[in-house]
Each structure stands twice: as C-alpha cells, then as structure tokens.
C-alpha cells in the first residue's frame, strides 16, 4: 500500500487579533496612568491652594487692631512764662491707645496706614520713627524763624511737632546724622532725598517736588539739638503725612521705634497731629519755611479742623487683617482744660 506523503499547510492568522488587543490594552494602561498623574497633581495643587486660602482667611479675621481710647489735646497761646495759657478752639493732637485682639497675628506698624477725616479734609498717615516736640513757636523781631523769648511778632502758639532725629550718636544706624535721617524717611517714601535744609519726595512729581520735612535748626537751633541748619540731622516731619508711636507696654521687649512690630499683649500710643493750617500764620511761616508754607500745611499742622461738634472718622488699615474703623463726635464744649477724652 502506497503511503500518502502529501503535506498540507494550514494558515492561522488568529494571533494578529491578539497582538492588536494587547496594543490597545497597553494604550489604555498608559492613558490611565497619565490621567491618574494629572488628577494627583491637580488634587495636590488644589489642596495647597485651599490651605493657603484658609491661612489667609484666618489671618484676615484674626489680625485686628483694637482701639482702647482716644484723647484730644489743644494748643495754647503763651506770650510769656508768667501768663496762663489760652487754649485753642481746636484739637491740635490726638493720642490713640491701641492693642491687638486675642489671637491676632503680629502687626508691622511700618505697613499700617491711618486715615483721618474731619468731614472736609482727609489725611493718609504713615509711620515715621520720630518723637513729639511741644515747644512754643516764638519768632524774633527780625522774622528769621529763630526762637526769641517774648517774641515781638509772629506766632506764639504751643504747637506739636514730629521730630525725626538722625543723630548717629542716638540712632541705631552707623551712618552720619544726615544720612541716618534720610534712611528713616525712606522707610515711608523710598525716593526721599535731601536738598539744602529740606527733605523731598520726588515721587510727588513737579519741579519742586513734595517737601515732607524741614530741618529743625531753622526753627530753634538751641532747643532742637543745638545743630546748625547745615548739619541736617534733625527734621520736623509734616503732620498731615506722618504719625508716631510711643510704647506703653511691651513685655517681651520686642517693640522698638525702628522695628515697630506689635505682638499680642503690646500696648502702644499712636500720636496724630490735627492742627488747622492757619496755626503758623504770616509773617512767621513764609519767612521761616517758605517752601513748606507753599505746600501748606507747615510742620505741626494737618489742615484738619477739630472744633466742637465735629464728626471725626479714623480708619486703621494694616498690611493684612481686618480694617479698624472708629467714629466719634467731639464734645460741644472743650472747657478750660488742655486734654479731653473722646473715645470710647
């Protein structure tokens, strides 16, 4: 019997279907991995943003400045030491005592803006490292702006001024007095510079620029450090542009004038000058400080008019946190005393 040696080759292409399925499966796995990675990144980003927003919201709610009291001070006219003061009809200065509410974040007073309004005039004030001066603004017979006891002409009002001391002997900066004073002003106005016996803010524009301070030697070189005008280490800052702070309570000793950061438990007093613009009248002002007079008001003035029955609005705006607003009405009569409690 003859053997059947015929070979048959069968064609089987089912494996191609399996390879296609595998490729599709791998593609789905890659897509799922990429999608999972994107979802994880988005979730992480949203979580981080939510945490940041929560912290900022908490900070906005918890960082509050609490105004404890406000006291008004009047100026006075005193022709000689033997005569009693005749007090002004307006408040020339406000002392505002405030602290931080419980749980509040620290507040850097360098970044705080205080807005005060008498209903007609509004001043936006920033912090300056300075001290309060209460000398009488007497003027000699020559009208030269220097102090003279029993002045023959000019203004004899007891005004309040903000003195910025750049004396290297008393200031933490190691630079010379003139430069140290400019450093202080540049914390509030980065473009501040000196020219002659004045401090300018070039950002105000114009040819003469905004004059924000005047050398104290022009008013009384003997009283304010005994320096000549050329020394330029002591300046009077404009009262309608700056406020100062005096420390009342600071248990951890962290609050200083050159680093005014308030912590919970601190108690400080912000001093705001509020004298009307006509306190330093002619012939004193144009002769003693013509550049400042042209800017109006002069040093120690703020162009406010806090007479009896005046509605006063004060807004304290920190760098972060809730804004504090205080409104009060001055008394119907100031009586015969120099200071009056206005708030609460």
Image (cartoon, helix red, strand yellow):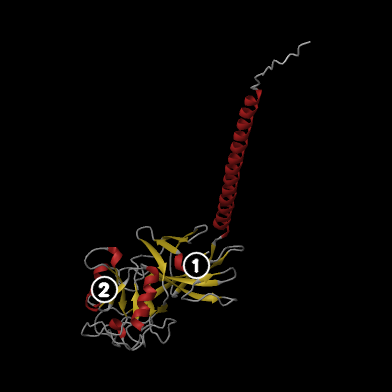
Looking at the image, which residue is at 63% across and 36% down? 29
Looking at the image, which residue is at 56% across and 77% down? 253
Please rate how many residues cluster around mark 2, counting C-alpha atoms within 10 Å: few if below 14, some from 14 to 19, many from 20.
few
Please rate how many residues cluster around mark 1, counting C-alpha atoms within 10 Å: few if below 14, some from 14 to 19, many from 20.
some
The x and y percentages for residue 280 are 29, 74
What residue is shown with label 1? 108
Q: Nearer the viewer, residue 123 or 255?
A: 255
Of badges 1 and 2, the one in the foreground is: 1
Q: Secondary structure at mark 1?
A: strand
The image quarter in which residue 205 lies: bottom left
Which mark, by number, is residue 100?
Answer: none
Q: Secondary structure at mark 2?
A: loop
Lower position in the chain sequence, tag 1 or tag 2: 1
**Residue 96 appears in the figure:** yes
> Which residue sits furthest top?
1
The x and y percentages for residue 326 are 48, 60
Looking at the image, which residue is at 57% across and 75% down? 250
Q: Quadrant of the N terminus?
A: top right
Taking 273 as reference, is 251 left or right? right
The image quarter in which residue 188 lies: bottom left
The x and y percentages for residue 195 are 26, 76
Q: Nearer the viewer, residue 142 or 254?
A: 254
- Cα separation, mark 1 vs mark 2, equals 37 Å
Q: Nearer the viewer, residue 36 or 264?
A: 36
**Residue 158 appears in the figure:** no
Compared with 310, 199 (above or below) is: below
Which mark, by number, is residue 281?
Answer: 2
Compared with 73, 232 (above or below) is: below
The x and y percentages for residue 82 are 37, 88
């Amino acid at each position: 019997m003859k053997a059947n040696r015929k070979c048959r080759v069968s064609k089987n292409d089912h494996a191609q279907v399996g390879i296609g399925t595998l490729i599709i499966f791998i593609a789905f796995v890659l897509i799922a991995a990429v999608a999972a990675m994107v979802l994880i990144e988005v979730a992480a980003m949203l979580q981080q943003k939510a945490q940041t927003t929560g912290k900022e919201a908490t900070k906005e709610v918890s960082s509050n400045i609490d105004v404890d009291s406000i006291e008004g001070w009047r100026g006075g006219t005193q022709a000689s030491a033997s005569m009693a003061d005749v007090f002004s009809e307006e408040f020339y200065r406000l002392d505002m005592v405030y602290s931080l509410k419980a749980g509040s974040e620290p507040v850097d007073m360098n970044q705080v803006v205080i807005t005060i309004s008498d209903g007609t005039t509004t001043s936006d004030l920033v912090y300056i490292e300075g001290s309060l001066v209460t000398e009488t603004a007497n003027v000699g017979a020559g009208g030269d702006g220097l102090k003279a006891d029993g002045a023959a002409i000019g203004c004899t009002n007891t005004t309040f001024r903000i003195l910025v001391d750049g004396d290297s002997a008393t200031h933490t900066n190691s630079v010379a007095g003139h430069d140290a004073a400019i450093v202080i002003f540049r914390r509030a106005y980065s473009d501040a510079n000196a020219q002659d016996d004045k401090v300018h803010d070039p950002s105000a524009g114009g040819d003469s620029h905004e004059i924000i301070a005047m050398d104290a030697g022009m008013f009384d070189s003997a009283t304010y450090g005994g320096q000549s005008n050329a020394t330029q280490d002591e300046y009077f800052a404009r009262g309608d542009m700056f406020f100062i702070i005096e420390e009342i309570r600071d248990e951890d000793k962290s609050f200083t004038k050159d680093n005014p950061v308030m912590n919970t438990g601190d108690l400080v007093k912000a001093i705001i000058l509020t004298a009307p613009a006509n306190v330093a009248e002619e012939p004193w002002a144009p002769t003693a400080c013509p550049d400042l007079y042209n800017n109006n008001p002069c040093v120690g003035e703020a162009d406010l008019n806090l007479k009896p029955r005046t509605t006063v609005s004060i807004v304290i705006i920190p760098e972060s946190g809730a804004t504090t607003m205080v409104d009060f009405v001055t008394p119907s009569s100031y009586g015969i005393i120099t200071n009056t409690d206005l708030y609460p």
